[in-house]
Amino acid sequence: MQRRPAVRIALGLGLLVVALAACKAAIGPGPHGRTVAVAGDGGAAAPAKPVLFEDERPVGKLVAFRDAEELRSFNDAWYDDVNPGERPAFFKMAGDQDAGAAPPPPPKTAPAPAGAPAQPSPAATSAAPRAPRPAAKKPSFAGESRAAEASKDKRADKDESITNNQHADVDEGDIVKLHGDHLIVLRRGRLFTISLAGDRPKQSKMVDAFGPDIEPRGTWYDEIVVDGDNVVVVGFSYARGGTEVGLFKLDREGGLTYRATYHLKSNDYYSARNYASRIVDGRLVFYAPLYITPQARSGDFTSQFPAMRKWHRAGTKADFVKTLVPSKLYHMDGEFPATRTAALHTVTTCDLRKPELSCESVGLIGPPGRVFYVSPSSVYVWMQDRARGGADRPQRNGMLAKLPIGRVDATPSALRVSGMPTDQFSFEEDDTGHLDVLVRADSNGDAMFASEQTAGATALLRIPLGMFSDTVLSTSPKRYRLLPRPDGFSVQNRFVGGWLLYGSGQGYVTNHQGQGRLFAVRYASPDDPPTTIDLDQGVDRIEPMADDAIIVGSRGSDLVFTPIELGASKEAHARRDFVRKNASQGELRSHGFFYKPGKGPREGLIGLPIRSEGTFGSQYLTEGSASVLFLQARALELTELGSLRASRLTTNHDGCRASCVDWYGNARPIFAKGRVFALMGYDLVEGRVEQEGRVSRLTERSRLDFAPRGGAPADDFD
């Protein structure tokens, strides 16, 4: 059985349905709040008891099934429940015009980038004053969580990260990883190791990314993670059904030895923005949805449970062993799903350090729409019914669940919530004991390409972690801080330091070539109005640069980079643009970008794949990047170091047998061992930074072509 790109694209576009709904918002608890005792987090250290609003009352209890018999009774009752008007409804979101909604504060307009005329804002007549620069802080890697600062010493003996992770303590699956002196690259169904030990990179090993007795057609080998000498290949098999986990052993010389393949029952995890796998505290962590329906009476509901089997050619369905038991499956006591289709949201953790892969799951039954976010301690899953469209059918909203990971004996907890985040970057578990989430009224989550189109009211939800409990509270509309709406559908958002930044630009299926508007919000300071920064380009990418940020976007045929000065001041400020003529982004995923801090404050190097102007984001699926552009940042001033260029795309005769579309991209900037590299398809190009007076320049130092030779691919889209 094969799957072609049209399947993922069609499924993704099918989810881009929007509805008319909105958030009611106001600032956090004030003098009229009340203190209520909230149950702890099931074994973990309980956060401080929060101060609740009067309308934040228990709306139900999150309970596990006691046994298979209780699960059977739940299934039968759900199956018989054909009157949707009488079943308990999920918490709904108030409309835009609700009388209780606080109007958004008037935005301020920050100074335009140097060299460009300031553009007036409809809500302000003068530009916000430039704030003094805050005291310089020690730079950290892009994507590094502030909460992870205390654990830096503990990680000092680990490999440096070459992945633009959202949290430093959470390693995300990608197409390239560094272990010791070797790069491990996943490319078109094969694994390659490349030694960096010598003066020039040298290919060490090439093996199939699947077992020797596996027919790979119909399987997508998407990403890899590395823990110790274990290399894990994560893919999705339409032929065999479910997530496929391939295990390999890496030796000191870069040799790869195949260990085993395991299959995990799941629906396709693919997201245009999110990643399927994580390594947290030495454990492999998956989030995977299983779409479920009530079985006919006397049917086996557990047949829909996640299960795992070790692959062998003579294997049968009887080899599957369930990773979830009824006592680890949770639901709202006395409630049934609001529709005939629901999801079994599961987090599966596996111990890679045992001789045989050992996995266990915890799950929660809820609506099918979802966005998930992985912090160093928990997986958060925001779930709701999908938007249907039309003001007379408001978007139903469900639950925000906190599912434990790691080795802590904790149980799931949840809240009733409104709206829907765009993607994983809409979340931030901060170091003050809060979870902050940017939501929109009309959004369908991040499955497939659903994150590429959102609409409706925009609000920031700030939740004390102490509110999470198995006694489920409804979140008050007063916790939703209404914010300005972005002017487009493809929204980018990112928490950087004490700031939330968001705006809209060009995505996979949308083309936003004009001016853009960035909103900057001090998310922990509800009295501070958001700052509006008018840009010459759309907001196609938002990335941290230590304590500051950079915005990348298209302006006509050019690609524009704008540093954003953040820090302790109440306003954000745009600095001078860098413009790359006749160019567009070569990668849209977060891992396509990397910022390497330098020795001094606000110094560093930036790498980003680029290609010719005017291309849609989705073109990277079938086309390689022309080059990787490197910029130098000094005091937030950007200058071009140079580009490392790709050879002509060499995939026509690589003998590709599986995963011949680059769903996770094919180009990355790499800063490793004090050296600068560009990975572009089958090219690994090393650059040398040369100093010419006060000017730095990047030139090509070496080039490794590690393309296999094996005839035409079996199928261009397999």
Image: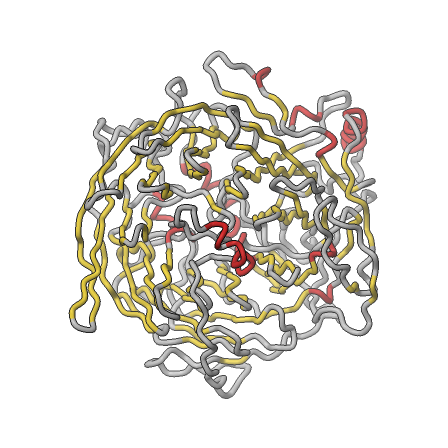
Residue closest to the eye, 296 or 611: 611
Q: In the rendered view of the protein, which quadrant contains the N terminus?
A: top left
For residue 25, side relative to residue 288 (left or right):
right
What is the x, y in percent for residue 129? 48, 86
* Residue drawn 37% across the image and 33% down it: 659
* Colour treatment of the image: secondary structure
Looking at the image, can residue 131 be seen? yes
Residue closest to the eye, 430 or 58: 430
Identify whether 272 is placed above or below 354.
Answer: below
For residue 229, side relative to residue 41 (left or right):
left
Identify whether 88 is placed above or below 660.
Answer: below
As drawn, the residue found furthest toward the bottom would be 126
Identify whether 188 is placed above or below 393.
Answer: above
Identify whether 358 is placed above or below 671.
Answer: above
For residue 574, side relative to residue 462 (left or right):
left
Q: In the rendered view of the protein, which quadrant contains the C terminus?
A: top left
* Residue drawn 77% across the image and 48% down it: 89
